[in-house]
Image (cartoon, helix red, strand yellow):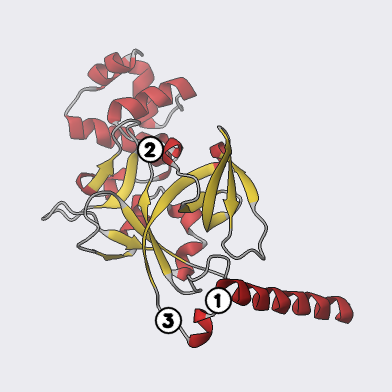
Amino acid sequence: MSFLSDNIRYLRAQKSMSQQKVADELVITRARYSKYEEGASEPPLEVLLRISRFFHVSVDLMISVDLRKVPMQELLKLEDNRILLPIMVDSTTGNNFIEIIPHKARAGYLTGYADPEFIQNLEQISLPFLREGKYRAFPIEGDSMPPHQEGSFVIGGYLERLEDVKDGRTYIVITANEGVVYKRLYRKDKETFELHSDNTFYDPYLVKAYDILEIWEYACSIATEEFMPEDLQEPDAKAMFKEIKYMLNDLAKKVKS
């Protein structure tokens, strides 16, 4: 918890409160709270949660990000759970910027998605028809979700509650195991989702709700390459040709082995 002591000292100063006043709010002694600010000891989980709720900053940001370097006034707070979501806002207009996750940063998104400094350094765009809500652009890899080609970007709107996922709609899903994927979702039960590719060559698979770190609902997409005539083939025929290609590649590997 290398940042915790500095962060709570900084946040307390922002509120212009004494250590005794904060300790009273947390229902602990001032001496105990003072040790947390000095870094002499670390708070147990229940006290850490109280500190997080008191300062309205999520636990992961509290312990993993130097909040003194973060423009807190430009970050959006989620309404219900008091977590600070690192999405940048135009301080003059109040409109949300759309951060672009480049292909080279896609792998690092799992470690940086909750870090305001990581998000702040991303390229940003603004689309006039996407004003309300929180949006982010993710790069597409592979051919599992035609007609979206590799190199395209899908812009997703942040979904605060998994209960709002609609069967058959497409979403950017971020999990610790799979990373960043773009799939069509179906709810299997209260705790499980089935993720489908529109390219039937790829089998669907299950993801537990508790493994989902973030989920973004499809809002629009940006193609970075022109569609070619072969892209306009009948979907079934195109899928068949791709499946044959994969079968031949697999057969070639087996023959070589």
Give the residue pinned by disc 3: 225
Q: CA distance from mark 1 to mark 3?
A: 20 Å
Q: CA distance from mark 3 to mark 2?
A: 41 Å
Q: Secondary structure at mark 2?
A: helix
Residue at 44% x, 35% y is 163
Q: Secondary structure at mark 3?
A: loop
Q: Is residue 56 above or below residue 256?
A: above
Q: Which residue is situated farthest in the left direction here?
A: 92
Q: Marks 1 and 2: in contact by CB < 8 Å?
A: no
User: Which residue occupies the foreground of this view, 140 or 103?
Assistant: 140
Q: Residues within 10 Å of mark 1 (few under 14, many from 20)?
A: few
Lower position in the chain sequence, tag 2 or tag 1: 2
Q: Is residue 47 above or below residue 141?
A: above
Question: Where the C terminus falls, by quadrant?
Answer: bottom right
**Horizontal and vertical percent for residue 20?**
25, 17
Say what amino acid the circle numbered 3 marks: Glu
User: Which residue occupies the foreground of this view, 249 or 85?
Assistant: 249
Left or right of 114: which side holds 203?
Answer: right
Say what amino acid the circle numbered 2 marks: Met
Of circles 1 and 3, the one toward us is 1
User: Which residue occupies the foreground of this view, 140 or 41?
Assistant: 140
Q: CA distance from mark 2 to mark 1?
A: 52 Å
Of circles 3 and 2, the one toward us is 3
Give the residue pinned by disc 2: 62
Lower position in the chain sequence, tag 1 or tag 3: 3
**Horizontal and vertical percent for residue 228?**
47, 86
**Horizontal and vertical percent for residue 111?**
49, 52
Q: Residues within 10 Å of mark 3 (few under 14, many from 20)?
A: few
Say what amino acid the circle numbered 1 marks: Glu
Of circles 2 and 1, the one toward us is 1
Left or right of 90: which side holds 136?
Answer: right
Give the residue pinned by disc 1: 234
